[in-house]
Image (cartoon, rainbow, N blue to C red):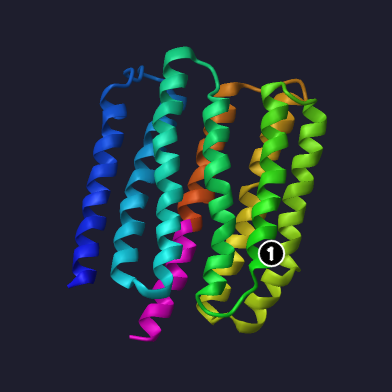
Amino acid sequence: MLNKSVNVWQKAGIVGLFALGSSSVFASTMLQSGDFVGYSFWLISMALAASTIFFLMEALRMGGKWATSLTVSALVTFIAAFHYMYMREVWVSTGTSPTDFRYIDWLLTVPLLMIEFYLILAAIAKVSGGIFWRLLIGTLVMLVPGYMGEAGYLNVTVGFVIGMLGWFYILYEIFAGEASKVAASQATPAVQKSYNLMKWTVTIGWAIYPIGYFLGYMAGGTDQGTLNIVYNLADVLNKIAFGLFIWYAANEDTAAKA
């Protein structure tokens, strides 16, 4: 009975969250015909919203040890969907890149994405808290100097270099550090496959962001419209697909034990 009550309240929460988000959608400035950057913000905000519902419903269905990982995936896509509504508004209203909103989104969602490595391993093995803290600290070292460089609070080259060091630290942990060793020695085949997809997403998908930073602020600048479209498409891989990799591991593990 208690579980049924919790499920009812969780489902009600889904409806409430998107009712709150819809107020931003309907109050927004209308997109202009031919504004492909604005279209990309709109399409991806809807994809993120749909992904949130999917991950939450699957967390309710599977429950158990995978519920936390899937709920965190839903938090990532929900936070991003809400920010995309505001980023679209900034772009449509001013024609400028919504740098502040994008970094607020990243400062919230990227640490959650890194925590997912710890959570999927914790679902199938006993892992140390050191993995959690190293990945969390690595994301902050990567993001905070990058924002300070783009916002003008820090030399852009210094911000870029420090941010890259944070990214390399994360790559070391997930490719050769303790997290990688636990995945190789204790994970099920489904979790290993998901882990590999996730770590290559962090390698290839995340590479788009420093490339954009370099081109936009250190190599004479680039078209802001094109840069935003590239960033938006990258978020499809780095947020939605990343969550789907976790869902695959959860679904395979749950089905195997059914």
Image vertical order of residue 185 relative to residue 228, above or below:
below
SS category of the residue bearing label 1: helix
Give the quadrant of the N terminus.
Answer: bottom left
Give the quadrant of the C terminus.
Answer: bottom left
Q: Which residue is mark 1?
A: 174
Task: Specify the segment rendered in magenta.
Answer: 243-258
Identify the residue at image location x=34%, y=44%: 49
Identify the residue at image location x=55%, y=22%: 97
- In the picture as drawn, the residue positioned furthest to the top comes out as 94
The image quarter in which residue 136 lies:
bottom right
Q: How far across and how far down the image is residue 13, in percent?
A: 26, 50
- Please state the total of marks drawn on the protein image: 1
- In the picture as drawn, the residue positioned furthest to the left comes out as 1
Tell me which amino acid carries mark 1.
Ile
Image vertical order of residue 238 relative to residue 104, above or below:
below
Could you tell me what secondary structure mostly forms the magenta stretch?
helix
Q: How far across and how far down the image is residue 179, in percent?
A: 67, 70
Q: How far across and how far down the image is residue 241, in percent?
A: 48, 55
Left or right: 207 in relation to 240: right
Along the line of sight, which residue is nearer the eye, 190 or 4?
4
| Within-10-Å neighbours for mark 1: few <14, some 14–19, many 20+ | many
Identify the residue at image location x=45%, y=51%: 240
Left or right: 94 in relation to 175: left
The image quarter in which residue 150 lies:
top right
